[in-house]
Amino acid sequence: MHTSRWRKRVEGFTLTFLERLKARSQPLFLHPVIFISGFVCLGLLFALQSWNSARIWSYRLDLGLLLKAWGVQYFIWGTICWLLWFWYGPRIQQLTIWRMVAAVLPFSILVAVVEEMLWVYCIPNWPIRRREMDYWKRLTFMLDGEMVDNLVIFWCTFFLVRGIGYYQKFREKEHAAAQLEIEVIQAQMRALRMQLNPHFLFNTLNSISSLMRTDVAAADTMLEQLSSLLRIALERREVQLIPLTDEMEFVEMYLEIQDQRYTGRIREEIRIDPELHDALVPAMILQPIVENAFAHGLSRLDSGGLLVVEARRENENLKLTVLNNGAGVNAEMATARSSQGVGLANVKNRLWLHYGADQMFSLDEIDTGKVLATITLPLQFAKSPTAKFTGYGV
Amino acid sequence: MIYAVVADDELLARQKLRQLLREEPEIDVVGESASAMETIELVRMTQPDLLFLDIRMPGMDGFDIIGALMAEPNLPMPRIIFTTAYDSYALRAFEIHAVDYLLKPFTFERLHSAVESARQQLQAAKHAPARDDLAKTNGHQYTKRIVFKSRGRILFLPVPEIRWIGAEENYVRICTQSETHLLRETMSRIEERLDPQMFLRVHRSSIVNLQYVKEVRTDADGECMVILVNGQKIAMSRSYRSRIQEWLHR
């Protein structure tokens, strides 16, 4: 009964001890085995050194005894220091200079004495050939010689622990800063994508509203198309990079809606190199460009409009182009700079956030009235292409 | 006449369906229900040919309703057309042989094509009631329709509507009269699911539906091609030429 309670207590202690050990994030050398062995190795080195210096003075000492004496001393110190770090580590980092002088200094003297007491107890035949000395005499003798050494060891460890604390804090801060940067970029991306949708959404709703009065069936068709578009946009949510097929699907749906508005005035061509269907592009990167071609180019034509969307491979790059024969680049550039050109500015921003300096975006007038928008970005493929379902049945 | 029941928990959704179905002279809506229990009761009483079924309903979902109906002995199972705002049940709907899967909001054309499929299925069943069983015993292995998602819609595409199929790297492009759809699939996999009596591989990268082939022509350069009824030209390899000639002269 009594023993079992004790056992429980010991188990409880070891359990919390192990848990705490696991919970602490720590550099590898602060693992107790490594830390204490390190101390013992240091002690053994000192033993060798004093054995060597004794030989120089032609003084014969038993190497085994020296190793034992130094080894035990540093083993005790290692254990004490590790326990100090384990129990007081976080508090050591918060100590002010006054607390150090007022509390840690007396504590260090106490620890130094206790360590020496333990050591004298463990090594009874030291000092050598003074068998007649009793425990207390030996203790005072040893303290006389070792007190300063002990204090040096204590304070070295103390500042080492403090240093580790600063180092860990520094690393944590660095990690947090990196994390924050990623989050900021993601938030920016979200914001940019949100700006793209409403612009187009409300224009389409307005078209539907207008069609409702004249052509109910056409309004219905447009509503269905808009719903499909929204369904896909919502499905994608936070996904930043999508296969080109998905982006083109979106563009095609957008064009279907535009077709209704500009009945027969615009011819559309889409040319995608089949090997690029699975190439990754930022979601909603083409739609604003196509939209821009309509808003500032094609919409001004009465007939004979042409829109060509093309995807080609150029070495290790993917080249996406949108050509239109609208009003010319000046009109487009002017609007691109104004508030209406927010779509194109977003394209540039998002390309920069995704690819840094590895991408290019340009808007050029290649012929009178013909404007070519070009996006060049590093060619990447989805590791596992999104499995859209296909089912067969009778 | 096709007797139909409309099951949807939203009044406006039922209203829209009923209005659109007025344009379908063959459809007679015999009842409406707004919950799972009502639907089961109504189907039991009216025994309709066709059930327009919303998936999310109070009480049970659409699939539970079908399960409950199938469990009833002596109750002829109506054909099902799902009408729902969610695209995530499409594959399940396809597996239980639903006629179609309409994503809300849908247009009259979309509804009309669904009704047309239902009409054909019902007619086929009337003329050959044992046809399904026969097909099973014959080990019928060719697909009659394909389900996939294209441009935000769910399509239960009857295979005869496919005019031709083109290979595009890891994808195939399925072309119908008015549209093309890109599917992630290989030519060989889709070829082996299609009835060779109906579809012929004419090139490494194309399969044509023989129903829509108008002629086979060799131009001045000796290049062979298949010309479809709509005038579309599809390149043909020489190795496949004899196969199509054989078919043409049959």
Image: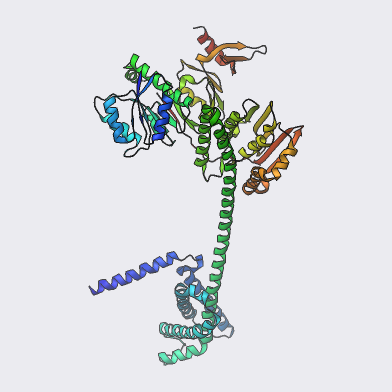
Q: Quadrant of the C terminus of chain A?
A: top left
Residue at screen point 61% across, 26% down: A263
Foreground pick, B163 / A101: B163
Foreground pick, A54 / A394: A394
Image coordinates of residue A193 in percent, x first then y, are 58, 45
Residue B169 location, quadrant: top right
Foreground pick, B208 / B223: B208
Question: What is the residue that sits farthest to the top in this orientation?
Answer: B249
Image coordinates of residue A304 in percent, x first then y, are 69, 25
Image coordinates of residue B250 in percent, x first then y, are 49, 7
Residue at screen point 42% across, 91% down: A136
Give above or below for A239 relative to A87.
above
Residue at screen point 51% across, 80% down: A154
Q: Is residue A278 visible?
A: no
- Is B133 on the left-hand or right-hand side of B152? left
- Is B179 on the left-hand or right-hand side of A357? left
- Is B179 on the left-hand or right-hand side of B147? right
Question: What is the residue that sits farthest to the front in this orientation?
Answer: A213
Residue B50 location, quadrant: top left
Question: What is the residue that sits farthest to the right in this orientation?
Answer: A368
Colour option used:
rainbow
Q: Is residue A389 visible?
A: yes
Q: Quadrant of the N terminus of chain A?
A: bottom left
Foreground pick, B150 / A130: B150
Report the number of discs.
0
Give above or below for B245 relative to A321.
above
Image coordinates of residue B191 in percent, x first then y, are 48, 23
